Image (cartoon, rainbow, N blue to C red):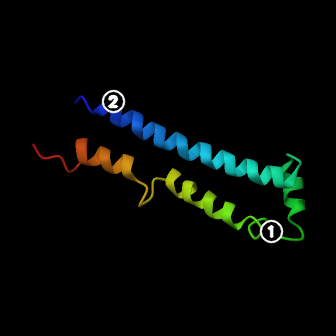
């Protein structure tokens, strides 16, 4: 099929975009803390959990995290592959 390769490129680009957004959100937390040591990040949350002051960032993190697992409603690459070449194809 002539559409298989562009579909695979679109699917790969979609997955890479999720990973880039997760990385940028994690960098936001690292900027808030300062040090890059994981034990110091935990210690910095002793007074208040970072999920409270960074709640919008937490929401922005949960969306690409859900998309990275290919769960509904963000499972379009797998759903497209199943409908074109998988279980639902009728010949």
Q: Position of residue 83 (x, y in %)?
A: 25, 48
What residue sits 74% from the left and 64% below the top? Answer: 54
What residue sits 31% from the left and 47% below the top? Answer: 80
Q: Position of residue 47 (x, y in %)?
A: 89, 71
Q: Is residue 78 above or below residue 45?
A: above
| 33 sits left or right of 75 in the view | right
- Extreme front residue here? 56
The quarter holding residue 53 reads bottom right
The reply to whether discs 2 and 1 touch (Cβ–Cβ < 8 Å) is no
What residue sits 20% from the left and 51% below the top? Answer: 88
Q: Mark 1 Cα within 10 Å, few/some/many (few <14, many 20+)?
A: few
Q: Position of residue 17 (x, y in %)?
A: 54, 43
Q: Position of residue 9 (x, y in %)?
A: 41, 33
- Extreme left residue here? 91
Which label number is shown at residue 5? Answer: 2
Q: Secondary structure at mark 1?
A: loop
Q: Name the residue carrying label 1.
A: 49
First of labels 2, 1 by sequence position: 2
Residue 15 in sight from this viewpoint: yes
């Amino acid at each position: 099929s002539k559409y298989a390769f562009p579909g695979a490129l679109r699917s790969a680009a979609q997955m890479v975009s999720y990973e880039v957004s997760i990385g940028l959100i994690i960098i936001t937390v690292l900027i808030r803390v300062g040090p890059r040591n994981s034990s110091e990040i935990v210690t910095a949350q002793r007074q208040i959990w970072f999920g409270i002051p960074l709640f919008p960032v937490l929401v922005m993190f949960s969306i690409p995290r859900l998309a990275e697992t290919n769960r509904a409603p963000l499972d379009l690459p797998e759903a497209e592959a199943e409908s074109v070449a998988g279980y639902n194809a009728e010949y």
